Image (cartoon, rainbow, N blue to C red):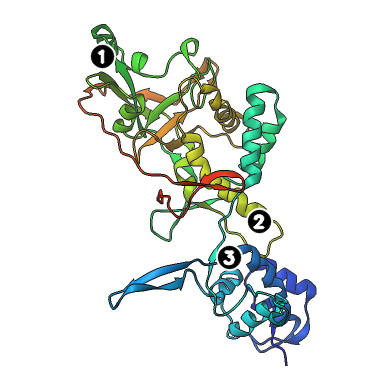
Amino acid sequence: MANHVCSNCVEDVYLKAIIDKKGQPAKCDACHVEREKAITVADLGEILEPILRELIELGDEVKRFSPDDENGYLEQEGDDLDYFVQEVLGQYFDFNDEIIEAVIDAEGCWPPDGDEPFFSTSNSYVSRRVVDQKHWSTWRHLEQEIRHKRRFFNFGVKGFFDELFSDIETLLTHVGRTNLAGSLVQSLPPGSLFYRSRKCDSGDLRERMFKQPYKYVGPPPIESARAGRMNPDGISLFYGAREWETCLAEIRPDLGGESGTITVETTEPLRLLDFTQFKHAYKVLSYFQPDYKEQAARCAFLREMGDLISRPVAPGHEAEYLITQAMTEYLANEFRIRFDGLLYASTQRKEGTNVVLFPRSTTKGSTLPVKYKDGSITFYWTNKIEYGHDERKYRLGAKGLEPDWDWWDDPD
């Protein structure tokens, strides 16, 4: 007699809905109660098989060594099928072995005819890497469109960001190496400190910086504001950092050069989108929800956005900032609850965090939500510059040059 599982015993809400729709009266082998809605384990295998086929691939054979065997032996990387069945279901059943056999049977493989089975209790599997071609392709397309075709009134850009950031406030992020979940949105109280630096190339400028620190080290007035990573010409934002060392690294002073650094404190509560945490972002998804692949791919793209918006742009190629400028304007003005600024990783100092704050409109014009911290002007002399280098390997794939993930260092 076939085993059954009822919708009451399933924890995943999407699978529960599937069973409620397809199920028939039967005695559930999990709760041992006659239920109105239950499916056979064979039916469950039919549901799981295509999901698992998309989710996993066979692990590679790798050579292992032991103290007693210097020649080594081959071992397949990964976990068994049982591990991934539990991963997809999100729970364990006493008849899990029967569920695994049902998945294997659902493959419809017939070895006597020469078929090679994918699912087997003797194989080990690894998760497939999620690649989001859709959002990458759209990002690159809009980047070119803004540069060469349609810069103003570009509804395609707004639609893209509407979809991309639709639930950004509810996405979670892993906190360090703990099991705690954090948020991509940071709320900072008034009095939070940031730093800003400027090169000092003359004694006259040094004196002016000392007498009027915020005027000469702070953000430029709108008539002097030049295009940057997050702003076009004529829009003055506050660019700074959470650490004074990061500020100095970002302005890249010459060896033997002098720089002035000020401390500012925020004047009101701020709501910042923290791109430094995007690499750890995730959304609680069900493998059974109809749009699982699309949502998983979108999360994969978001996890790469922190590096995407922080990437260095070579001098003379500042037009590449147009897409991040459009994104900043969207988050500052078009998002349903506007952000006051962004945090993003420094490319000049490892573990450094940059900040950009947006101006607010008042009856007296635009104003930035910061003020100079009295007596904080500090001058630094650059006596050493160091560089470090990590190897990156690439290989030619079906779509051109791509990272060789087996060799790349893990940035985490």
The image quadrant of residue 192 is top left
Q: Quadrant of the N terminus?
A: bottom right
Relative vertical location of residue 339 with respect to residue 97 in this rendering, above or below: above
Circle 2 SS class: helix
- Label 1 amino acid? Phe
**Res 293 label:** 2
Q: CA distance from mark 1 to mark 2?
A: 56 Å
Mark 2 or 3, nearer chain start? 3
Q: CA distance from mark 2 to mark 3?
A: 16 Å
Mark 3 or 1, nearer chain start? 3
Percent across and percent down for residue 268 are: 44, 31
Percent across and percent down for residue 341 are: 49, 32
- Label 2 amino acid? Lys
Circle 3 SS class: strand
Percent across and percent down for residue 36 are: 77, 82
Q: Give the foreground label among 2 and 3.
A: 3
User: Left or right: 22 with respect to 143?
Assistant: right
Identify the residue under disc 1: 210
Identify the residue under disc 3: 57
Task: State whether residue 311 appears in this view.
Answer: yes
